[in-house]
Image (cartoon, rainbow, N blue to C red):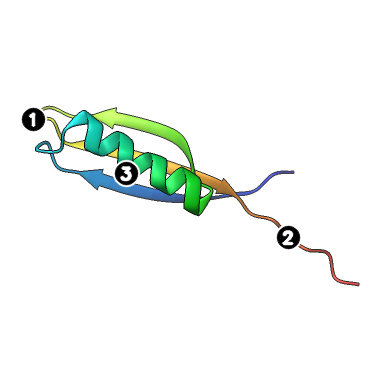
Amino acid sequence: MVEYEYRVMTLPPRLQRGEIRALLSAEAEYGQWELARHRVYLGGRRRIWLRRKIIRVPRP
């Protein structure tokens, strides 16, 4: 069974789409995060859920 750890980011409405794309690309490349969910609320505030697999090493 695959287990994930999650990270929730809340972004203000003043960020441009290109800035958000650069931020998420950096998280994906360096932190191994992937986009799980993205919501845009009234007023432009965004909440983004990122996830990555938890890798468990078996004990010898």
- Under tag 2, what secondary structure? loop
Local packing at callout 1 (Cα closer than 10 Å; few below 14, some 14-19, many 20+) is few
**Residue plotted at (18% across, 29% down):** 41
* Residue type at tag 3: Leu
| Nearer to me, 47 or 23 | 23
Q: Nearer the viewer, residue 56 or 31?
A: 31
Dot 1 falls on a residue whose secondary structure is: loop
Residue 43 - label: 1
Relative to residue 53, is residue 17 depicted above or below?
above
Q: Which numbered dot is residue 8?
A: none
Q: Give residue 46's position: percent from left, percent from top.
A: 23, 36
Amino acid at the residue labelled 2: Arg
Residue most extreme to the right: 60
Q: Would you say the residues marked 2 and 3 are in contact, meaning their CB atoms lie under 8 Å apart? A: no
Quarter where residue 18 is shown: top left
Sequence-first disc among 3 and 1: 3
The residue beneath circle 2 is 56
Q: Nearer the viewer, mark 3 or mark 1?
A: 3
Residue appearing at x 49%, y 46% in the figure? 29
Which numbered disc, 2 or 3, marks the residue that appears first in the sequence?
Answer: 3
Of mark 2 and mark 1, the one earlier in the sequence is 1
Asked whether 16 or 36 is in front, the reply is: 16
Q: Is residue 17 above or below residue 25?
A: above
Q: Which mark is residue 23?
A: 3
Image quarter of the N terminus: top right
Distance of label 3 from label 1 (alpha carbons) = 21 Å
Could you say where residue 58 lies in the image, as x and y percent from the top left? 83, 64
Labels 2, 3: front one: 3
